[in-house]
Amino acid sequence: MPLAEKGPSFLNVLEVDDPKLCVLLHLMTPMEPIEPVMESPLARPLAQQKTAASDLLTEVGSAKTAMEGMLLANMEKNAQFPFISYYVINTSQTDPVDFFRNLQAASLKKFDPRNLRYTAAHTLDLFNEVATIARPPLDPSSKRPNSTTTGYIISVYKVFEGDDGEKFEKNWLYWTGARMLYRYLPKSAGLRRITLHKSISSGDKMYLLLCECSNFLENLSSAALLLPALRARLCGYTGLYKTTASF
Ligand SMILES: *[C@@H]1O[C@H](CO)[C@@H](O)[C@H](O)[C@H]1NC(C)=O
Ligand SMILES: *[C@@H]1O[C@H](CO)[C@@H](O)[C@H](O)[C@H]1NC(C)=O
Ligand SMILES: *[C@@H]1O[C@H](CO)[C@@H](O)[C@H](O)[C@H]1NC(C)=O
């Protein structure tokens, strides 16, 4: 994919062209009680949701159908997506469509409102990586964080079908805020890579920008300073995340 500009010298622009890897993202909204009047003041729906999402990740991990997986938890109050699961699929080993169907079925079962007494909206989609900028040396096939202090800035954008042309993607560094991130994130955050994902399914497109910083959790204030500026751009959702489970 043609890139509008070269990244700064400390980052490498990787033309991602590896059709053998595919990413499944599972975005979850906060769980709402199906009977709000019965809700106990001691209820901890967020903790319950985290347990269910971690269990699901563990099940997928032991099925060995995905190469890697992570459960990302939002670190702010009242997030639109408190949890996002991220799976890397090797398409030479696993059919992504089968993987998607199996995960969807497992998720419906795991989050069945009849058992949990809560409901949430679940968005599952398969994505391609359309572009990555990364600090070398980096193994592009592994998405695992390289430190326990790794945190992520994630932005999600929905784009109408047909508006996602090449011209649009050529300017992704601008409209996603990626350029702002690599220019203004303090060096201490340890920016490691920024990856743009695009949904594969037909119809309206979803883009998800994942910005990985190795020392993020050591000094959250540095990223927090950038958030208002990122949020002032376009219509996407932006949040701060950390890994709570992985395989
Ligand atoms: C994906 O699977 C193929 C076939 O098993 C294997 O040759 C390749 O190394 C795998 N890719 C990665 C990144 O693990
Ligand atoms: C993790 O990656 C960052 C960015 O590439 C690098 O600065 C840091 O030294 C790495 N940490 C470890 C423990 O390898
Ligand atoms: C945290 O980041 C802020 C903003 O970049 C910086 O002013 C401050 O010195 C940093 N604190 C530490 C302990 O590194």
Image: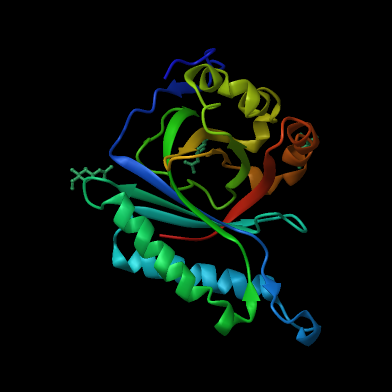
Q: Nearer the viewer, residue 26 or 97?
A: 97
Please say if 35 is above or below 94: below
Residue 237: image quadrant is: top right
Q: Residue at x 47, y 29 (%)?
A: 132
Please say if 76 is above or below 61: above
Q: Where is residue 66 in the image (x, y as percent from the top left)?
A: 33, 56
Q: Position of residue 223 (x, y in %)?
A: 72, 39
Q: Residue at x 53, y 76 (%)?
A: 112
Residue 99: image quadrant is: bottom left
Q: Nearer the viewer, residue 140 or 206?
A: 206
Q: Where is residue 134 in the image (x, y as percent from the top left)?
A: 48, 29
Please say if 216 is above or below 188: below
Ligand 1 found in image quarter? top left
In what quadrant of the picture does the C terminus appear?
A: bottom left
Q: Is residue 40 left or right of residue 52?
A: right
Q: Position of residue 178 (x, y in %)?
A: 61, 28
Please say if 99 is above or below 147: below
